[in-house]
Amino acid sequence: MTTPPFGPVSDEDIRIVSAQLGRQARNVVGIAARCVCGAPTVVSTAPRLDDGTPFPTFYYLSHPAATAAVSTLEATQVMGEYNELLASDEGVREEYAAAHEAYIADRESIAVVPEIAGISAGGMPVRVKCLHALVGHALAAGPGVNPIGDRALDRAEWSPDVCQCVDYSVEVATGR
């Protein structure tokens, strides 16, 4: 399980994340999950950006294949199904509320930002809004922490156990 504080982020990590995102990565405080090949899969972003903007999304799915697989789930209305599950299953609601608290605790271990106090990501703790954030949390925290992220990861046409990385060359990262 990878939780804050993270080890130092390397220039190579930033280069790869920038290539994955198609833009310069900013305010990265850690790589919360990695592909089996070692490439970043989930980035942790500072709770306050360099320009002063509060940023509640601490875990950010960066791996293109994972992002595409989760986007496919979102497009097939899986979030509605998960919202119904939250409404009907008290145990899942309790686990999801605990995931919300764990997410905030991880972020606040880096910095407390009053403007986003009590706010996590992905709709936690009462609804499912963004599977990308929830899967990012599930990958970062490990199985059993985020019940909706775990369920989405189980259904995604992507596995953290199989490398689906591309060649993150300097040309791709810099656009040259």
Image (cartoon, grey):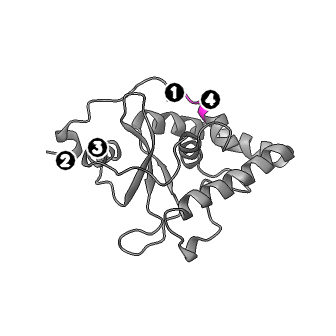
Image coordinates for residue 37, horizontal then vertical, percent: 37, 28
Q: Quadrant of the N terminus?
A: top right
- Whole-number angstrom distance, CA of label 2 to CA of label 3: 7 Å
- Few, some or many C-alpha atoms within 10 Å of disc 3 (few <14, some 14-19, many ≥20)? many
| Magenta stretch bounds | 153-158
Task: Looking at the image, tell me whether mark 2 or mark 1 is earlier in sequence order.
Answer: 1
- Whole-number angstrom distance, CA of label 1 to CA of label 3: 20 Å
- Few, some or many C-alpha atoms within 10 Å of disc 4 (few <14, some 14-19, many ≥20)? some
Q: Quickly name the residue at label 3.
A: 19
Task: Looking at the image, tell me whether mark 3 or mark 4 is earlier in sequence order.
Answer: 3
Q: Quickly name the residue at label 4.
A: 155
- Whole-number angstrom distance, CA of label 2 to CA of label 1: 28 Å
Hey, what amino acid is under mark 1?
Ser
- Whole-number angstrom distance, CA of label 4 to CA of label 2: 33 Å
Residue 174 image label: 2
Q: Quadrant of the C terminus?
A: top left
Residue 109 visible in the shown view: yes
- Whole-number angstrom distance, CA of label 3 to CA of label 4: 26 Å
- Few, some or many C-alpha atoms within 10 Å of disc 1 (few <14, some 14-19, many ≥20)? some
Task: Looking at the image, tell me whether mark 1 or mark 3 is earlier in sequence order.
Answer: 3
Residue 72 image label: none
Helix or strand or loop: what does disc 2 sit on?
helix
Task: Looking at the image, tell me whether mark 4 or mark 2 is earlier in sequence order.
Answer: 4
Q: Quickly name the residue at label 1.
A: 159
